Structures are given as C-alpha cells and as structure tokens.
Amino acid sequence: MTQTLAEILKPIDREADGAGRRTAIDVYDVLQSYILDGTLKPGTIISQVAIADALQVSRTPVREAMRMLQEGGLLTGEPNYRSRVVEFDPVDIDALYAKRIVLEALGVAMTVKRLDKEGLRSLETVVKSLESPMAHEDFAEWQRLHRQFHRSIVAEAGSTMIADLEQLEKRSERYQSAYKGAHLPGWWQRGEAEHRELFQAIANGDAAQAGELAARHLARTALELLAALAPEYDSSRVRDSLRFAGAGAKGV
C-alpha cells in the first residue's frame, strides 16, 4: 500500500533549539534529507499543501523550500503548486559528474598549494574514519564523512567553487544511495584505496597528481553508477571530462 506524506514525514519540532517558528531553511533541510536518503522516492509527486500538513508548518516556508530544492536539482516543477522528486536519470548522472570531475580536480589542485598542517591532519582523520566499522555499518554516517572528505579536499578553492561543488555533491548522493542498494562487490575497498592515495598525493604537495586522482575517483564512481543503474547508457561525457581534467590538473 502506498504511504501518504503524513505517514512518511514527521512534523518539525517547533521547540527545537528554542525556536518557536520554523523557517524555509528548516523545511528545506528536512525535505532534502528525506530525498537524499530515499524516503521520498524518485518520481514522488508532492504538493505544498500536503507537505505543510505533514510537517505541520505554514505554506510560506514550504513554498520557498520547494523552490530552493528545484534550484538544487532535487525537485522538478509541476502544475498547481506541485513538484516531483527528480527521477533517476542517466543523462543527469552523466552531466553532473562531468561537471563535478572538472571542477573538483581544479579545486583539489588549488587546495594542495594552500592547505596547512592542521587541515592536513583533519583530512587524515576523516580518511581513517571512513574506514571505521561505524562508517561501514551506518550508511548515513559514511555519507556524512564522505561529504566531509570531499569538502576538505577543496577547502582552499574559494567559497564560490565550494558552494557549487556542494550542490553537485548533494545531487550525487541520491545516486550513491541507490548504488549502495546494488551491493556491488568491493565498493568500500575501491573507495578507501582511492581516498588514501589521494590523501598521500595531497600530503606530498603534488597538485597535479592530486587533481588527477580526484578526477579518476569521481569518474570511477560515475561509471559504476551508470553501469549499475543504466547499463546501456553511453557515458562518453564522463570519459571526456576525465581526460580534460587530467590534462588541466597538470597545468595548475
């Protein structure tokens, strides 16, 4: 039986953190988490009225939150104040990873030249935490640490690039959640080996190698995602961006 939004979503606690009135950011954070973890499944149609009723908030913050989610690529607009959770789309995977590969390779190469010892120690801690039993047993914890890892390796790339990469990463997480469900062999091990190799290049101060390794890490993830979710899809854009990013990193 299909669940209603009221059965899926929990009302927002109006008294949390001493706040009596919830904002669009609160609603955005809640809806985004439900979309990223798959609670709101791809293709689900939602309305402002239904969301406001389910979360027990007014329609004004819901309307703004849904607009923000549309801008972030997690919702598409529908008639009559409705939206639809974006469905799994190989074209979207291809395009967002092609863009992310190029931007992140550049951001990593820029960060290598500017990262201090404290930043390097923090990055090493994240790399080790990603390999912990807790991260392996709790996908939400792994996803939080993985997000922190990717933010750390571009930490010195500038606020504008960091913000762009964070949006791309959020869209990627929806596909990572689906990919996790495929239970493909060696998934953890491949990622962890790449994280360690990338950390070592950053620690060595090798901007060109770090940028290329970051590009390869993302490209490998994208190609495995496409192979698992859309095996017939032509992933040439990801491959083109990998070649471009590899050549560009050497020139930074």
Image: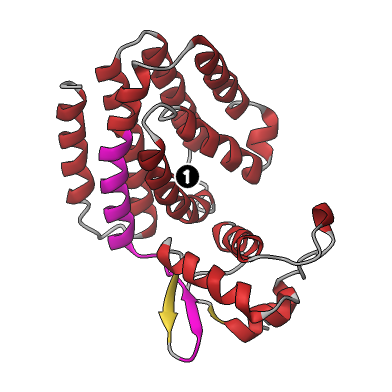
Picture layout, residue 109 above or below residue 104 = above
Quadrant of image for the C terminus: top left
Please name the residue shown 35% across and 40% down the image.
Answer: 161
Q: Reply yes or no: does residue 98 show up in magenta.
A: yes
Circle 1 crowding by C-alpha within 10 Å: few under 14, some 14–19, many from 20: few
- Magenta stretch mostly in which secondary structure? helix
- Seen in the picture, residue 83 relative to 25 is either above or below; the reply is below
Residue 93 lies in the magenta-colored region: yes
Which image quarter is the N terminus in? bottom right
Please indicate whether residue 193 sits to the left or right of residue 144 in the image: left
Q: Is residue 113 left or right of residue 41?
A: left
User: Can the viewer see residue 2 in this picture?
Assistant: no
Quadrant housing residue 208: top left
Label 1: which residue? 184
| Vertical side of 59 occupied by 187: above or below | above
Q: Nearer the viewer, residue 109 or 239?
A: 109
Residue 7 rendering spot, x and y as whole percentages? 74, 77
Q: Residue at x 59, y 57 (%)?
A: 37
Q: Give the magenta range.
A: 80-104
| The quarter of the displayed image where residue 63 is located | bottom right
Q: Quadrant of residue 219?
A: top left
Above/below status of 58 relative to 230: below
Position of 95 with respect to 173 (left or right) is left
Residue 241 at what x, y percent from top left? 20, 42
> What residue do we see at 45% from left, 45% from top?
166
